């Protein structure tokens, strides 16, 4: 039997070795590519979900701020004019003076189609029409009886201090929808005499286009797929606008019919995020009436949330956009993996050839070494990819910190802005009254009120501190923890308290720590805000600090409603909250936990239901910090 040629034996052996090694390398390369894709897909999914949720919450916050602004204006106008002689039939001068003030107020605000006062019989006694930016006072002969209109009856049935908010619809003139369309919401509240008896009602016809514009501006990053829906499933705002206000035109095109499964989920929960066959849905709920609750707490009043009337802020990412991740991955990485595959094929051919011959031992060793180096580089690349993923996660957390900070800034701006703006508008009205009034006594009285409002504004400005000032530089600076606590207390007293809660502080001398003061301030403001929200009527908040030689220890104790044991373990989870939808999005304590961990500190909360909660925060102080503080 003839022997096989040596070249044929060599070729068969090399081929077997190559196929075995190359098959293993392909499996390894496929596993690496799969892991790479899964990491990239997961990172993009987390970013997408977080981006959608943050933008929806920003849209809700914009609407809540607008509603709070209108309610604040309504309350201010009612309280500053209800005990005057306005409702006496023999005092037309008082109504004329007030009408002038309303005209100035209407022009400055630019968002009220009408400002009206009706007496107890439902007859208009003062009315100012916005008139497309040129407000005019209605003549006595033009005033009408509105006793048969639903908004007068609904407002008259209110308890003192509460607010009526009408459905959001389009303005109708003489039985026809006004062209161009004018979205409208009516706000009403009672006006009382000195004895607390009903005198009449104050009504504001709010131009809802400004609310929709603010919602679109807040959600500009997702403008092509964000919507505002009423409780019947009709679009109040939608991309392209063709589906908006269908109920005003007798149409039945609703989101509820287009996406019935999603609509059921929307109505079962106040907020959430889920995937189905129609894409990724993110939603939250706005209860307009709930925005009036809390504006009268200083008077001991409250208004229940009407959960039968609401709006839904919704975003929908369509399935084609969700499936783009795989095509994007292939477009970005296909060439890389093809080059790697070619490199592996070449490497294993060399290995197979060098291992065949004993005379090529040195080359075989070098080839194996190169292969190991290739694998080590892949490990290093994978390690770098994992590190990059962690950095992206940290970036998402930083965005969450900034979003929560901007939400808090919105809360403070709403409270402080109206403390300044409303007296300014009153000053403008009184100044115009002085200019037009020839009575010296009346002018002196107006001047006295102007002085009072001016001193109030000066006091507000004097006590106002900067919460949102960005830090400059990349290095930490020595931070005064007690100063951060005092700033947080001052901010809370200006924007959250009223007269119902007392804050006591007992702050010992503390060394400084290396940190960003703005973030330490944010920690204490969020903790104080949570404590205040847990005390519905009256309460006491005690804040103390001390230094035990190694750590700065801060205790924040409240006598609020406390936290149940089943919720205590979840309070630092993102988006977890036991509050109503309008009282927070569940990110405050999560952000606090992230910041404290950033500075190697710790935070714990102990709570007893019905008695209150105690939050303990510790920051370590390094020896270098102690030396620098001397």
Image (cartoon, rainbow, N blue to C red):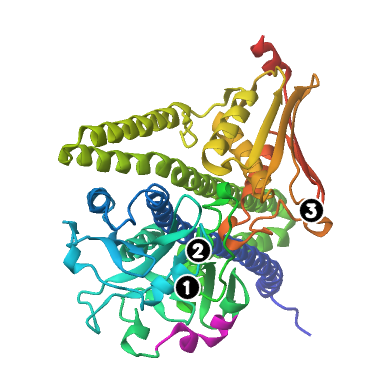
Alpha-carbon span between mark 1 and mark 2: 9 Å
Q: Position of residue 581 (x, y in %)?
A: 59, 62
Q: Position of residue 597 (x, y in %)?
A: 69, 39
Which quadrant of the view contains residue 435? top left
The label nearer to you, 2 versus 3, is: 3
Callout 1–callout 2 Cβ contact below 8 Å: yes
Q: Label 2 crowding class (10 Å Cα cut-off): few <14, some 14-19, many 20+?
A: many
For the residue pair 434 and 385, the one nearer the viewer reads as: 434
**Element under label 2?**
helix
For the residue pair 155 and 538, the one nearer the viewer reads as: 155
Callout 3–callout 1 Cβ contact below 8 Å: no
Which quadrant of the view contains residue 342? bottom right
Magenta residues, as a range? 253-264
Judge whether residue 380 can be spotted in this image: no
For the residue pair 29 and 201, the one nearer the viewer reads as: 201
Q: Which residue is mark 1?
A: 317
Answer with left or right where residue 438 lies relative to residue 374.
left
* Residue 568, numbered circle: 3
The numbered mark, 2 or 3, whose residue comes first in the sequence reads 2
> Looking at the picture, does residue 155 appear above or below residue 296?
below
Q: Which residue is located at x 20 percent, y 74 percent?
A: 180
> Looking at the picture, does residue 74 appear above or below residue 240?
above
Most common SS among magenta residues: helix
Alpha-carbon span between mark 3 and mark 1: 34 Å
Answer with left or right where residue 396 lies relative to residue 510.
left
Quick one: quadrant of the C terminus?
A: top right
* Residue 52, numbered circle: 2
> Does 258 appear in magenta?
yes
Q: Label 3 crowding class (10 Å Cα cut-off): few <14, some 14-19, many 20+?
A: few
The numbered mark, 3 or 1, whose residue comes first in the sequence reads 1
> Looking at the picture, does residue 622 appear above or below residue 471?
above
């Amino acid at each position: 039997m003839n022997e096989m040629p040596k070249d044929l034996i060599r070729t068969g052996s090399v081929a077997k070795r190559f196929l075995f090694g190359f098959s293993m390398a392909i499996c390894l390369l496929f596993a690496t590519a799969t892991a790479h894709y899964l990491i990239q897909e997961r990172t993009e999914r987390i970013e997408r979900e977080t981006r959608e949720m943050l933008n929806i919450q920003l849209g809700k916050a914009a609407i809540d701020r607008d509603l709070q602004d209108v309610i604040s204006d309504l309350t201010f106008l009612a309280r500053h004019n209800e005990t005057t002689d306005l409702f006496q039939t023999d005092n037309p001068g008082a109504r004329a003076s007030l009408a002038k003030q309303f005209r100035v107020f209407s022009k400055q605000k630019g968002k009220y189609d009408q400002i009206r006062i009706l007496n107890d019989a439902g007859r208009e006694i003062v009315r100012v029409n916005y008139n497309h930016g040129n407000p005019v006072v209605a003549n006595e002969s033009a005033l009408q009886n509105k006793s048969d209109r639903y908004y007068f009856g609904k407002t008259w049935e209110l308890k003192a201090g509460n607010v009526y908010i009408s459905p959001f619809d389009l303005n109708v003139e003489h039985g026809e929808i006004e062209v161009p369309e004018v979205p409208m919401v009516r706000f009403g509240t009672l006006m009382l005499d000195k004895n607390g008896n009903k005198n009449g009602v104050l009504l504001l016809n709010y131009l809802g286009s400004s609310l929709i514009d603010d919602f679109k501006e807040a959600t500009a990053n997702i403008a092509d797929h964000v919507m505002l829906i009423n409780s019947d499933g009709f679009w109040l705002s939608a991309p392209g606008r063709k589906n908006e206000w269908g109920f005003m035109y007798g149409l039945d095109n609703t989101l509820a019919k287009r996406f019935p499964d999603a609509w059921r989920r929307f109505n079962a929960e106040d907020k959430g995020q889920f995937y189905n066959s129609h894409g990724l849905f993110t939603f939250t709920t706005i209860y307009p009436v709930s925005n009036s609750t809390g504006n009268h707490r200083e008077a001991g009043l409250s208004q229940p949330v009407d959960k039968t009337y609401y709006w839904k802020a919704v975003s929908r990412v369509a399935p084609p956009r969700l499936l783009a991740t795989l095509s994007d991955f292939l477009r970005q990485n296909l060439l890389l993996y093809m080059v790697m595959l070619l490199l592996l094929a070449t490497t294993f051919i060399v290995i197979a050839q060098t291992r065949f011959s004993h005379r090529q031992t040195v080359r075989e060793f070098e080839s194996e070494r190169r292969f190991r180096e290739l694998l080590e580089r892949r490990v290093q690349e994978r390690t770098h990819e994992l590190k990059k993923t962690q950095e992206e996660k940290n970036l998402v957390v930083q965005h969450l910190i900034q979003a929560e900070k901007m939400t808090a800034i919105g809360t403070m701006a709403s409270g402080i802005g109206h403390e300044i703006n409303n007296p300014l508008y009153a000053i403008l009205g009184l100044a115009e009254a002085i200019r037009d009034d020839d009575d010296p006594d009346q002018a002196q009285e107006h001047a006295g009120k102007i002085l009072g409002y001016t001193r109030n504004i000066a006091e507000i400005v004097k006590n106002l501190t900067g919460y949102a000032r960005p830090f400059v530089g990349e290095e930490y600076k020595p931070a005064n923890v007690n100063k951060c606590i005092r700033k947080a207390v001052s901010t809370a007293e200006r924007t959250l308290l009223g007269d119902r809660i007392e804050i006591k502080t007992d702050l010992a001398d503390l060394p400084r720590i290396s940190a960003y003061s703005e973030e330490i301030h944010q920690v204490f403001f969020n903790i104080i805000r949570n404590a205040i929200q847990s005390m519905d009527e009256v309460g006491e908040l005690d804040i103390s600090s001390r230094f035990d030689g190694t750590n700065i220890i801060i205790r924040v104790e409240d006598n609020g409603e406390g936290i149940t044991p089943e919720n205590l373990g979840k309070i630092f989870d993102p988006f977890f909250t036991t509050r109503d939808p309008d009282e927070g999005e569940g990110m405050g304590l999560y952000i606090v936990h992230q910041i404290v961990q950033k500075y190697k500190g710790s935070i714990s909360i102990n709570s007893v239901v019905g008695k209150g909660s105690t939050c303990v925060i510790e920051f370590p102080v390094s020896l270098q910090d102690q030396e620098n503080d001397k």
